[in-house]
Image (spheres, rainbow, N blue to C red):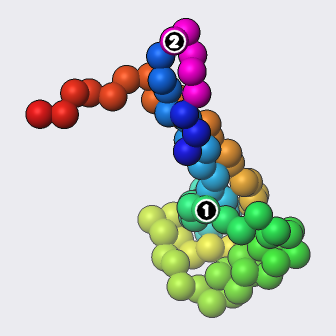
Amino acid sequence: MKIQRKGGELMATTNTKVIRLSFATEGGKTFSITIPTPREDLNQAEVLAVMNTIVSSNVFLTTSGALTGIRDIKVIGTVTDDLFDPPQA
């Protein structure tokens, strides 16, 4: 977390990352798993291997059926600027 001055006020800025693994289901829908704080050195081959293991082990049963394949992999970064901290009672 960083504290920055903006217009004379203190503002807390946080940076967060998640990885979203998206799978196809038997019913033609998408099922996603979101994992916080992924390793910085992740590579596509590692993630694909894990996702293929998840599909082949059949551990998830969704409302639209079993997982049938890989749809997408995204690492999503979010920056949050906290402009107001409520007073503590």
Q: Which amino acid does label 1 sit on?
A: Thr
Q: How far apart are marks 2 and 1 (CA)?
A: 32 Å
Residue 59: percent from left, percent from top? 53, 85
Nearer to me, 41 or 67: 41
x 77%, y 73%: residue? 47
x 82%, y 78%: residue? 46
Residue 42 lies, with reference to residue 83, above or below; the image says below
Would you identify the image quadrant in which residue 3 lies? top right
Nearer to me, 10 or 77: 10
Nearer to me, 66 or 45: 45
Residue 26: percent from left, percent from top? 62, 69
Q: Is residue 6 magenta?
A: yes
Would you identify the image quadrant in which residue 15 lies? top right
Can residue 31 be seen here?
A: no
x 76%, y 64%: residue? 40
Q: Which amino acid does label 2 sit on?
A: Gly
Residue 65 marker = none
Taking the image as shown, residue 8 lies to the left or right of residue 28, namely: left
x 64%, y 52%: residue? 17
Taking the image as shown, residue 13 lies to the left or right of residue 54, namely: left
Residue 72 lies, with reference to residue 56, above or below; the image says above
Q: Which residue is label 1 attached to? A: 37
Q: How crowded is mark 2: few (under 14 residues within 10 Å), some or many (20 or more)?
A: few
Q: Give the range drawn in magenta.
A: 4-8
Q: Which residue is label 2 attached to? A: 8
- Indicate the quadrant containing the C terminus: top left, top right, bottom left or bottom right: top left
Residue 8: percent from left, percent from top? 51, 12
Q: Name the outermost residue toward the bottom.
A: 57
Mark nearest the camera among 2 and 1 is 2
Q: Residues within 10 Å of mark 1 (few under 14, many from 20)?
A: few
User: Disc 2 on helix, strand or loop?
Assistant: loop
Would you identify the image quadrant in which residue 25 lies? bottom right
